[in-house]
Image: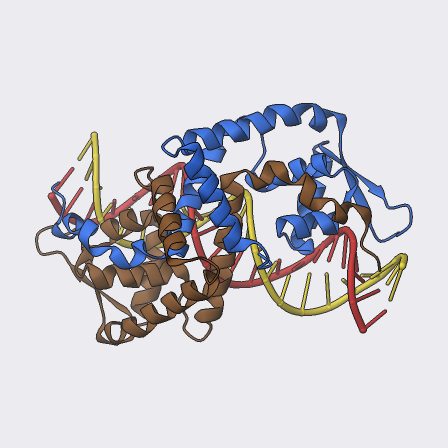
Chain colours: A blue, B brown, C yellow, D red
Amino acid sequence: MEKIESREKSTAERRALDSLVGYNLRRASVVMLNDFEVEFAEVPLRPTTFAMLATVDENPGISSADLGRLLGIKSANMAPLIAELANRGLIERRGHAEDKRVQILFLTAEARNAMPKWRQQALRHEERVLLDLTRSERATLLRLLRRVWIGKGG
Amino acid sequence: MEKIESREKSTAERRALDSLVGYNLRRASVVMLNDFEVEFAEVPLRPTTFAMLATVDENPGISSADLGRLLGIKSANMAPLIAELANRGLIERRGHAEDKRVQILFLTAEARNAMPKWRQQALRHEERVLLDLTRSERATLLRLLRRVWIGKGG
DNA sequence: TATTGTTATACTCTATAACTATA
DNA sequence: TATAGTTATAGAGTATAACAATA
């Protein structure tokens, strides 16, 4: 079937949404999420669980609460995520020596060994999506994005 | 209680995630979504429904299928959204003159009258979140974001 | 055969509320 | 009183599968 009329006018008539940062952020975010899934198709890691593992890897012994604060995840939502990664043998929970409320987190040997490969996959995924942007443009984009969210308790 | 050790090292040790565009996109997007909710607290519009109304306003007579394609929403997900806006008296569905499968969309008088105010609210919301960015920086951010998602079928 | 629009369904992310154990 | 962690629950966005009507 032929395109109907409204389709042809789209470019000229979408100005309002096009100039909204929030709308374009969401669209760009969806593209990144979709490609992340492609890259990690055989590895059962989502962006959130990858971010958790990477952060625990870089902060061994971090508490669940601090991990949640760093990543902007509420503690009620952290619990099942932590449990999932623990059940899958990727992170280990231990009690804090001084504060009995706190559980501190470590990667298992298996996860620690796999992290370099997973990090490379994440970089390959970013490289693929951002192919059209120069290094300088990517740095600019990163800097501006960080200024949007940093310090706003996302 | 005192901060535990891991918290203090965060700035130095979060390099990997900090340099991932996808992660920062998601964090920035969450900040925008949260502030959108604040701005539209008394108006029952979410980013998605606002985008739909704005697009129908600018493309009166657009079909559901084309609206979904423009906004990156699958037709299975469009159906309940369209139904919600129609039930609330904000959009009107009519049959297409030549193609009986197609339903074309229009804003009701009520929605058309309210759109200028809602658009202003959206701009006020963006202004508030992006206060720290200059006009030039906002334009750069918009341009780079569009280059991330345009043409990638988000 | 392909497209439009719909229903049903499932998963992820996010949110609030209520609870316990501890500080 | 406040914090850490958990459980239960709900809302929103996105996904696939299957379907009827039409092209």
Locate residue A150: give its quadrant. Answer: bottom right
Residue C20 image position (x, y, % from top left): 85, 61
Q: Quadrant of the N terminus of chain B?
A: bottom right
Q: Is residue A31 above or below residue B31?
A: above
Residue A131 image position (x, y, % from top left): 39, 30
Residue A97 image position (x, y, % from top left): 91, 45
Closest to the observer, A113 or A78: A113
Residue found 38% across the figure and 70% down from its top: B121
| Total count of labels | 0
Closest to the observer, B54 or A124: A124
Asked if residue A108 can be seen in this view, the reply is yes
Q: Is residue A97 left or right of residue D5?
A: right
Residue found 38% across the figure and 40% down from its top: B148
Residue B107 image position (x, y, % from top left): 23, 68
Q: Quadrant of the C terminus of chain B?
A: top left
Q: Residue furthest left?
A: B98
Closest to the observer, A100 or B93: A100
Asked if residue A50 can be seen in this view, the reply is no
Q: Is residue B118 above or below residue A108?
A: below
Residue found 28% across the figure and 59% down from its top: A16
